[in-house]
Image (spheres, rainbow, N blue to C red):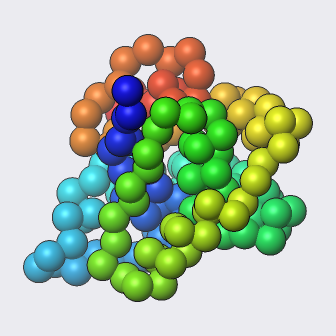
Amino acid sequence: MQVVPFSPVASGLLFGKITTGTKFDAVDDVRKFVPQLTKENIAANQPILDLLAKYSALKNATSAQICLAWMLHKYPNVVPIPGSKNRERILENLGAWNVELTDAEFAELEQALDACTVFGHRGHVESEQTSFEKNWAKK
């Protein structure tokens, strides 16, 4: 069975380019409705972005590529399909295929992510909080 995750780069947040000052297009950008992308939640999620930036520098990759490489390493039956209207982002996402996390790097990243709280849900409210993918703040 293959699984296609919903919003594998958190509506662009995990690219590391969205800031509290980012303004989403009022006409056709649905991200203006995503709870994770409020100014408060972007600021509160900064430790996750900092962690991804650290690994990006170590692996000569982008934050989105680290995010997708983590997902591919953790879930071999997952087929992440990050959406974008931007050609650069599409090519960047494809580059994740070339980012390889060693088992040690993955374990270290996984442990660091598990210590993070995620602020703002992504369209549905997650409930149990036992590991990173379920570690959503109830806000």
The image shows residue 75, relative to residue 54, as above or below, that is: above
Residue found at the very far left of the displayed protein: 27
Report the residue at 56% width, 15% height from top.
Answer: 130
- Quarter where residue 31 is shown: bottom left
Location of residue 18 in the rendering, given as x and y in whole percent from the top left corner = 48, 70
The image shows residue 122, relative to residue 42, as above or below, that is: above
- Residue 49 visible at all: no
Nearer-the-camera pick, 48 or 105: 105
Is 125 placed left or right of 67 in the picture?
A: left
Q: Number of callouts in the render?
A: 0
Location of residue 99 in the rendering, given as x and y in whole percent from the top left corner = 72, 60
Residue found at the very far front of the displayed protein: 1
Report the residue at 61% width, 62% height from top.
Answer: 96
The image shows residue 57, relative to residue 118, as above or below, that is: below
Report the residue at 50% width, 18% height from top.
Answer: 129
- Residue 129 visible at all: yes
Is 129 placed left or right of 46 in the picture?
A: left
Nearer-the-camera pick, 74 or 33: 74
Query: Which quarter shows the C terminus?
Result: top left
Report the residue at 39% width, 59% height from top.
Answer: 82
Is 92 placed left or right of 81 in the picture?
A: right
Location of residue 4 in the rendering, given as x and y in whole percent from the top left corner = 35, 41
Query: Which quarter shows the N terminus?
Result: top left
